[in-house]
Image (cartoon, rainbow, N blue to C red):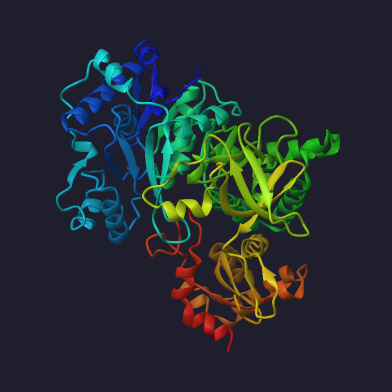
Amino acid sequence: MTYTRTFDLLSIEKLLASKKSLLFNKMGSTYEGWSGQKIVSYYFKCTQFVLDENIKSGELVVLMPESANIEWLLLDLAIQAMGGIVVMAHSTIDSDKLETIYSETESRFYFYQNPELFEKHEAVLAGVSAFNIEELNLEKEMTKEQYFDISSKVKKEDTSTIIYTSGTTGTPKGVMLSHFNIMSNVQAVTLLLPIRDKHRILSFLPFSHIFERSSLYYMLALGSQIYFIEKPHNLVDALPKIKPHYFTAVPRILERMYDRVVEEFNSRKWLGKKVFQWASKVADNYKPYRGFNPIKFIQIRFIRLFLLGKFRRRLGGHLEAIMVGAAHLRPEIAKAFYAAGIRVREGYGMTETSPGISFNRFEPGMNRFGTVGLPLPNIELDIRDQDENGSGVIWVKGPNVMQGYYKQEAQTRKVLTEDGWLNTGDVGLLKNGFLKITDRQKDIFKTSSGKYIAPQELEQHFSQSDLIEGLMVIGFQRQFVTALIHPNFSALKSWASQAGIHWTSPQYMVLNIKVKERMKKELEQWNADLPKHKKIKDFYLMHESWTIEKGQLSNTLKPIRKKIQEDYLKEIEEMYE
């Protein structure tokens, strides 16, 4: 079916005819199923509420959800169906940035769920109509005839949503997306997914982020069963209960799963470690797209059945694939999941493109580990200002490209040409049609010796170490490269136990001479294959990881380099003394 507006995803007549549960909310330790009829009833109550509150066509309405649930999803679509424009603000935003949003949008409304968020921003919200989504007055229900009469006036070219994103710059910009922008992306992506109405899907990422919100739109279009489990930390409990077939995730979640498996095998005796090392090597070298290899096939089947079978059962036993986006995923992790019989498909996009740009497919030969896949069918992609390796700035054009930044024409002109080409700001290359992201254009820097450094490429290289959980390289206008490192304390603790080193707490262990010496040896190992100007010469060990709350990470967990360097200025300067 062809959809042109976001709320068309709720096929009213089809839902009314369905009695089976389609959407599921977490209720304590169980999950409450909503039938098609219940979904339509609640949805029509939301549209009536929007009408009663005099939310006019073209009105901007601020939503501040955390994780998604049925109520947020239906309210989002109800506002759009009545002609309103949903303004998404991340729940982690500080009051100054929220004030910027309200100043720019002049919105009269604020919807929230967590009372702490209202208290946090109470000064900013003075004079604004604020509603807790759990306490909405939903007594009246709009008639089907009235709904279709009002919603028919909404055109596909109308602005559907404004999503405020600061990315890694810290400056809020309101990305304007039309119904057509979003639905063109839904049409393109759903054609590539093997998901059907019989499949169970998990949702736990922030609903304010375009990745999760659009993923839910995809699943509505495909008619699959969606389970809202509230938070990522509920994943361990939810997986064996729900036994999902698919879910979307950011790389950090898969990295934690992978690290736990590695830690478990490393805690075993000598033989267990050796077998796992062999299995990791087999998985890392396996390239299924290069044709059938009977020996490799038998090895992978052995790993899948006897080594990683327990891991697969922990994930529910039915998991077919995980769709990953928002940041770089280490290829060895995707390969390890593949060895366990779970396909990981990495994609690439941005808020400004509604969001999908490229995606690794499910068909044989249409996936490459370490890449973000092939461009979507309705996307034009161009690599400009290429270097000698073919790497350059990624430009895209297509029906999914934003209308512009709200009330920021100068910023819009910086990235969007008159003929519709968008400068993504990312640097990448195409190899056999597959896109590989190498860095952010603005993050590439020169050392004082005039050598260019692409920091993300270096960070991905060193993050392959089992001892490193997070790393950021430093070196702009400096004579050499250094790094801020957050160790993998589980792996480090295991090493310390074997080395006979008394373990206390991370705060003190990062100061331990032997721990520093061990990290130095680890860096030397990973430095070996790098040219001299890219080698890390010194480092500082951090006992705390970066957080969104401290402004050090974006909402997609990407490091905000300027803020981190400000927070660790003293430690950085000491490395160059």
The quarter in which the C terminus is drawn is bottom right
Coordinates of residue 30 in the picture (x, y in percent)? 35, 32
The one of 423 and 511 positioned closer to us in this rendering: 423
Tell me residue 245's x, y (percent): 54, 30
Q: Which residue is at a point 23% across and 53% down the rendered structure image?
A: 116
Q: Residue furthest front?
A: 418
Residue 462 in view, yes or no: yes
The mark tally for this picture is: 0
Q: Nearer the viewer, residue 458 or 271?
A: 458
Q: Position of residue 228 (x, y in %)?
A: 39, 35
Residue 328 in the image: above or below residue 510: above
Which residue reaches farthest bottom? 577
Q: Is residue 97 left or right of residue 556?
A: left
Determine whether, in the image, residue 526 is placed left or right of residue 455. right
Q: Considering only vertical position in the picture, is 564 above or below 432?
A: below
For the residue pair 158 and 205, the one nearer the viewer reads as 158
Residue 344 visible in the current orientation = no
- Reply above or below: 402 against 568: above
- Tell me if 148 is positioned left or right of 517 in this view: left
> Which residue is depicted at the point 61% across and 36% down?
379
Q: Residue at x 75, y 39 (%)?
A: 300
The x and y percentages for residue 466 are 64, 61
At 34% across and 23% down in the image, what residue appears? Answer: 34
Instruction: Say if 361 sits above or below 478 in the image.
Output: above
